Amino acid sequence: MRILFVAGGTSGVIFSIIPLAQAARHAGHEVFMAGPEDVMPTIASAGLPAVPVTSRRMLETLYDEQGNRRQIPTDLHERYIFNGRQFGRYASWCLDGLLPFVDHWRPDVVVGGHLAFAAPLVARYVGVPYVKHAVDMGEPRTIDLAAAAELAPDLRRLGLSDMPRSDLFVDICPPSLREADAPEAELMRYVPYASKGRIEPWMYTKGERTRVLVSAGSRLTPDYFDILGGLVDKISQLDVELLVATPEAAVEKMGPQPDNVRLGWLPLDVVTPTCDLVMSHAGGTTVLGTMHYGVPQVLVPYLPYAWGFSERLSKYGAAKLVRPEDDSPENVTQACREVLDTPSYWQRAQDMSREMATLPDPARVLTAVERLAG
């Protein structure tokens, strides 16, 4: 069987769909994963055939045709619409490469990561089933509607009157954290995946000191170093071993650090099981990976889409939520201290890990995809 996986515009949204693609390849199916040029190394490093379909980058959606930066709305609902338009615009760019590709390599089924809105259009163009694959624990429906509006010209070009619905939805959100009105889905266990590199002994071992991981994200904004520097300074005073996952380009600019602080690239799937706490900006795969290993979290959800699942995990008791407007180093450090000093956070995180372990693995979910494709 030929299975085409369509990835989104950044590496972060690719990690979630890699395990199912690998399971399909290991089962003997022909597999290709299509995506933008700049994520080809991520796909190829997972041992998957990588097909570039656009040379444009996701960040280019922030600019209009004249090169002027679009104004990002502050209203939450308007922000969802803005983001949906972004993803729709990006999907349109990907179609320029995807349609000629499937004219030559005809898939039997198309699997698209949620937010990869070109996937359902390609599936209907070829006339095969479409599988939507979640990339985190839920996206606002408004984003889907706005993406469909942005893609209206492409829909007409392909003879479609509306965005095609999925024939199967693979969800990686554990049952306890699914929204009450979540659609029917084939549930799948989340399998952590991260970019690869050399593994050192300190990454998978831990001393007597409490170990805290800060995932600082990968985008170097102008205020990046001031915010991160203040955070490192405050949290390191908790008498912990502090690991800070940050781009290598930032390490030198951050300057000398105390002996209990490590900065740089970290294999999160190796380091996280050794940690007592993970503090992050609530990126979907970081949150899911931390849940998988049963480690409590402190979350500062800067991106609007992350607010919903961050709040649900906080109410479950496995995380402490800090509002973005309250993200001073002092407040974040206080939240870390509370989680470390309150055993119930660890217990609830362990409960969630056990729940996730009961879900079907990618190889079992693959059988549903195979049945769908006939």
Image (cartoon, rainbow, N blue to C red):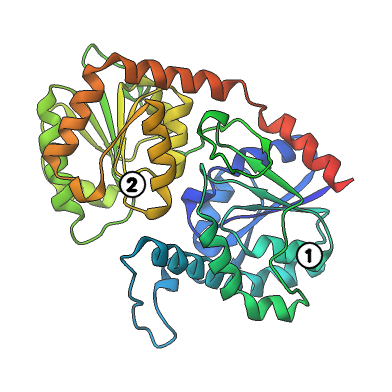
Residue closer to the observer: 238 or 225: 238
- Give the residue furthest to the right: 374
Left/right placement of residue 340 relative to residue 311 reads left
- Give the residue furthest to the top: 208
Name the quarter where the C terminus is drawn: top right
Q: Residue under label 1, please give it.
A: 124
Residue at (83% x, 53% y) in the render: 108
Assess whether mark 1 and mark 2 are in contact (beta carbons under 8 angstroms): no
Q: Position of residue 175 (x, y in %)?
A: 57, 30
Amino acid identity at mark 1? Arg
Tag 1, which secondary structure? helix
Residue at (59% x, 43% y) in the render: 181
Residue closer to the observer: 274 or 46: 274
For label 2, the crowd category at 10 Å Cα-Cα, with few meaning under 14, some 14 to 19 and many 20 or more, is many
Q: Position of residue 249 (x, y in %)?
A: 26, 52
Q: Residue under label 2, please give it.
A: 301
User: Residue 79: which numbered mark, if any?
Assistant: none
Residue 210 shows in this picture: no
- Give the residue furthest to the bottom: 66
Amino acid identity at mark 2? Pro
Tag 2, which secondary structure? loop
The numbered mark, 2 or 1, whose residue comes first in the sequence reads 1
Residue closer to the observer: 28 or 108: 108
Distance Cα–Cα, label 2 vs label 1: 35 Å
Among the 4 quarters of the image, the one containing residue 290? top left
Residue at (25% x, 17% y) in the render: 342
Residue at (36% x, 53% y) in the render: 303
Q: Position of residue 318 (x, y in %)?
A: 38, 26
Residue closer to the observer: 262 or 186: 186
Q: Position of residue 81 (x, y in %)?
A: 46, 67
Among the 4 quarters of the image, the one containing residue 212? top left
329, above or below 305, in the image? above
